[in-house]
Image (cartoon, grey):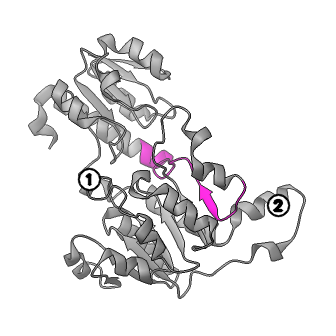
Amino acid sequence: MNILNVDPYCYSQKARQALESFGNVEEIVYSRSQLMEKLHNVDVLILRFSHRIDQEVLDRAPMLKVIATNATGTDHIDLEYAEKRGVEVISLKGEYEFLRNIHATAELTWGLILAGIRKIPTAFDSVKQREWDRNRFLGNELFGQRLGIIGLGRIGEKVANYAQAFGMDVIAYDVMPEKALKYPFVSMCSSLIECIEKSDILSIHVPLNDETNKLIGRNEISLMKKNSFFVNTSRGAIVDDEALLDALTTNHIAGAALDVLEGEGVDGFVQHNNLIRYARNNDNLLITPHIGGVTFQSWEKTELFIAEKVKQYLQYGRDKTE
């Protein structure tokens, strides 16, 4: 079995050993063109988010049986075409019990909130320029503010729990309103619009699918409170980039912090993205390069979990991995 890992940086040694127990593992970083040249004899492809695995790539991999990614989101993979080709896509999607032990993205959400409302990155930049002017960085406290959470799943619930320590009021909207019984300290909203309108800080924690694509569009952003703060650590395509940019440019909202952007991973993306261009010269937008799950602990846990799922699938078939 030929296994190609195109994201070997800091890859878990335990996961590597699990893969080596049933195949020949090659670890190398490829450009897109190089990857397509090397896929002709690959049985298993391991990756994080370094490549978009679309029809063009899949057509160059006649032997491919499995694509494995230690992520919940699979929008970087053409799932429909992979299924048509008979390629199994193994990810963390739906692994709710396992994922409850992964804390990285929820923790980063709070890092982004604090960094944004207290202007921490800009303040540090000023000190590096040998300045010491604290009046430039007047910010806001979290205590007593209302946090709105869109999607009260395994990340949303962690973010809500952390909010209690800051003395915040927590409201949420979820397509499963019965979750209100599980979180008595969270006030469930009857609609997405209600949650948006009432939030001082709005944080997005829903998966990307047909229903959530552009869930936060121009109308929804227009309904946000004046001087509210927006956070997205889920998927970039959930938000209308241009509508968010307009809200920032006109100071309709105080600021935003994003760990994800639509189109990330496409060649030239960083150079041409309007939000990144805006953030270079404005301190009310903070962007990080999709680092929500990027911790040593989360990578080791998820990579080992996925490696074991791949092993089980190849040995026993689909039923044993579900």
Q: Which residue is mark 2?
A: 126
Residue located farthest toward the bottom when viewing the structure as drawn: 144
Q: Residue at x 33, y 74 (%)?
A: 192
Q: Where does residue 64 sit, x and y in percent of width and height? A: 25, 20
Q: Residue at x 58, y 74 (%)?
A: 252
Q: Residues within 10 Å of mark 1 (few under 14, many from 20)?
A: few
Q: Where does residue 267 sit, x and y in percent of width and height? A: 52, 31
For the residue pair 111 and 138, the one nearer the viewer reads as 138
Q: Where does residue 227 sit, x and y in percent of width and height? A: 59, 78
Q: For the residue marked with disc 2, what is the amino acid?
A: Ser
Q: Which residue is mark 1?
A: 210
- Find out whether residue 275 is within the magenta segment: no
Q: For the residue marked with disc 1, what is the amino acid?
A: Asp
In-image side of 46 versus 190 (left or right): right
Helix, strand or loop at label 1? It is loop
- Find out whether residue 288 is within the magenta segment: yes
Position of 167 relative to 78 (above/below)? below
Q: State which quarter of the image contains the N terminus.
A: top left
Magenta stretch in the rendered image = 281-299
